[in-house]
Image: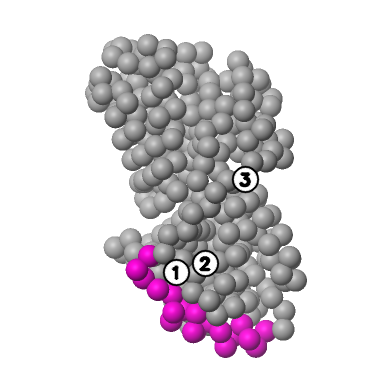
Amino acid sequence: MKKKMMSAVLCAATVGSLVAGCMTASAEEDKLVVYGIYKAGDQTWFIDEGAAAQAAVEAEGGEFIFVDAKMNPEEYLKAIDNAIANKASGIVTCIPDQTMSQAAVDKATEAGIPIVAADDALQDTEGNKLVPWVGINAYVIGEANGEWLANYAIENELVGKEEVGLLLMTMDTVSSCVPRAEGEFDKFTELCPDFSEDNIFYADYDGTTDKGNTAAAAVITANPQITTWLVTGANEEGCIGAARALESAGLDADACVVGLGAYMAKDEWNNKGAEGTCVKASAYFSAEQVGAGSVEVLMSIINGEEPAMETAVDAVVVTPENYKEEMGSYAE
């Protein structure tokens, strides 16, 4: 698998107080124990991310405990409490509801346990990060999807046609997802200035395939004048949900769906072949880099260092022609 570059951006905010609060507790523990608490532990992305985090922790001689919060805020806070009760050395986490960020950080800080956010930031009400974050370079990755889709529209002479619509699958309540859709919209409209904004639609969902399907189906049904759909969105599940909605509506033959993650697009191509699905491309970024990267940042805090507040992973758009080369074992 080709190596992807990971870029770290040091924000003005510092984590000095967090480091200081964690050192005493960490020093008292004989064994490294890291909790990985993920909002949707049954999704492929978090399974892969957790596996990478586990490998990184075990390489340090420690134990990794994977917890699925099941998109349930109560389950999530209970998992934080369990990590504290079991004297965890540290926590890496993706929170199901970012409005709970302060509560989660306060619990960990009071217990002297360092915490690192993965994918979705732990942030205050103004969007400022409370602890270091590791995730994808959201806006840039959105731009990559928008560029690929725009080029597809141009090459297939779809710009300026009344029956062609662009559907953006959005997750407006998740801060890490908003810039993905913004990047997609900005780059697509930049490259296709003659594409009517009246033919650009939005479907908001919660990150799951089922809700993505329902949201997309509602937009498709409400706009029968659109017979050719171009689709991209905030995560892979939403885009695959939209693909299923297009199939149900009998509109998949002329549609083009560009996913975000590629961990489900590769199943489309493996199981159906390039011609058997309307999923034509997907932005691939490595769950391994995010999972291992979150542990790397956590270990730097445990070791008394001050990490960057933001560590962002870039992506490459993959298609049925190049996904196996780009994704390596993750294409299986």
Instruction: Give the left or right position of residue 44, taking residue 195 as reference.
Output: right
Residue 184's place in the image compared with 245, above or below, is below
Q: Amino acid at mark 3?
A: Lys
Q: Amino acid at mark 2?
A: Val
Instruction: Give the left or right position of residue 174, taking residue 301 as reference.
Output: left
Structural distance between the alpha carbons of marks 3 and 2 = 24 Å
Which badge, 3 or 1, is on the more N-terminal residue? Answer: 3
The residue where tag 2 is placed is: 116
- Residue 7: percent from the left, percent from the top? 49, 54
Residue 130, by quadrant, is bottom left
Report the predominant secondary structure element of the magenta stretch. Answer: helix
Q: Residue at x 44, y 27 (%)?
A: 148
Q: Nearer the viewer, mark 3 or mark 2?
A: 3
The residue where tag 1 is placed is: 131
Which badge, 3 or 2, is on the more N-terminal residue? Answer: 3
Verify whether residue 20 appears in magenta.
Answer: yes
